[in-house]
Image (cartoon, rainbow, N blue to C red):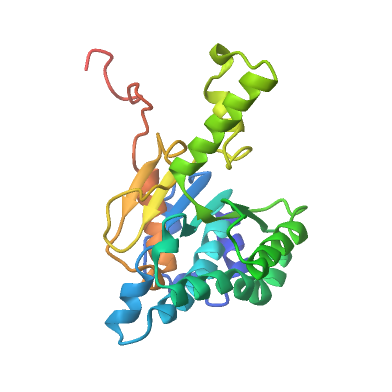
Amino acid sequence: MFMMFRALRKWFVSPFGSFSGPKTETLQRPVPKHVAVIMDGNGRWAQKRGLPRIAGHRAGMKAVKRITKVADALGVQVLTMYAFSTENWKRPKDEVAFLMKLPEEFIVSELDELIQNNVQVRFMGETDQLPAHTLRAVEEAVKRTSTNTGLILNFALNYGGRRELVLAMQQAAHAAIHDGLVPTTIDEAWIDEHLQTSGLVHPDLLIRTSGEIRLSNFMLWQLAYAEFWFTEQLWPDFRDQDFIQAIDDYCNRNRRYGGLAINESKDA
C-alpha cells in the first residue's frame, strides 16, 4: 500500500490527504486492469452554466487529465476514453469542428507530461473521416509514446462498436475467399485479434457519467463481462474521488463469469 501512496504523490501536486473520497486502504483486492469510460455530460455541464457547449468539451478535457493521473497512480494498466463516436457526426458542424481540434490541443499541452510519466497513447476508430490536423496530432502522440511501458491511454475516436464488428466480419469474409480461412476455425480468439482493441485486455470496469444507463455503441464485444458503474456526475465534474469510489465499488464486487463465487455452495 505504501507503493500506491508513493505513486499517487508522483502525479499529484496537492497532497493525497486532500481527497474526500474513500481511502485507498479499502482497495484490498486487485484494481481493474482495464477501465473504459463513457465521458458524458459536457454539453449539459456548459448549458447549466449558461455557456456554449464547446466550453463543456474544454472542461471535459481537463477531466481527462485528472482521471489519467489517478488511474495511473492506482495501477490501472489501460484507460480507454470514449472521445467521439461514429454517431457524433450528427451534431452541429461547429461543435464537431471544435471536437476535432481537441486532440491537437490535448497533445500540444499534455504530451510532454505523458511521456515523462511513461504513458503510452493509443487510438482506436476509423481515421478516414478525420480532418488532416486531427490525424496528424493522433499519429504524433502514438509515435512519440510508442516505446513507453506504463499506463496505456486509449482514445476511442470516430469509433462505433457495431462498425468495429462489421469490419471484423468483412476481414473474415475476405480471408475465407482469398486466403482459405475455414469458417469453423473462426473463434473468439480470432475475433479478438481482428478488433481495434487487439492486444489489449478486455475492460474489467465501465464507468459512465451524467446519469445515462446505456452503452451507446461502445465496445459491445469487449464489455461482455465488465462491471458497470454509473453516476449522475457530469463528466467535467468527475473528480479523483469519484474514480476512486468506482474502483472501490469494483473491488467489492464478486465477478463470477457464469460460475459460483468462492463462498457460494455448489448447490445454491
| Quadrant in the rendering for residue 3 | bottom right
In the rendered image, the residue lying farthest to the bottom is 50
Q: Quadrant of the C terminus?
A: top left
Q: Residue at x 34, y 40 (%)?
A: 253
Residue 167 lies, in percent from the top left, at 55, 37
Residue 179 lies, in percent from the top left, at 70, 20
Of residue 41 and residue 135, the one placed in the foreground of this image is: 135
Number of numbered discs: 0
Q: Specify whether residue 197 is in view.
A: yes
Q: Specify whether residue 76 is in view.
A: no
Q: Residue at x 62, y 27 (%)?
A: 174
Q: Relative to residue 244, is residue 169 drawn left or right? A: right
Residue 106 lies, in percent from the top left, at 60, 72
Q: Is 46 drawn above or below residue 185 in the view shown?
A: below
Q: Relative to residue 22, is residue 110 drawn left or right? A: right
Q: Residue at x 42, y 47 (%)?
A: 218
Q: Is 181 drawn above or below residue 164 in the view shown?
A: above
| Quadrant in the rendering for residue 148 | bottom right
Q: Residue at x 31, y 85 (%)?
A: 49
Residue 154 lies, in percent from the top left, at 58, 54
| Quadrant in the rendering for residue 144 | bottom right
In the rendered image, the residue lying farthest to the left is 268
Q: Relative to residue 117, is residue 211 drawn left or right? A: left
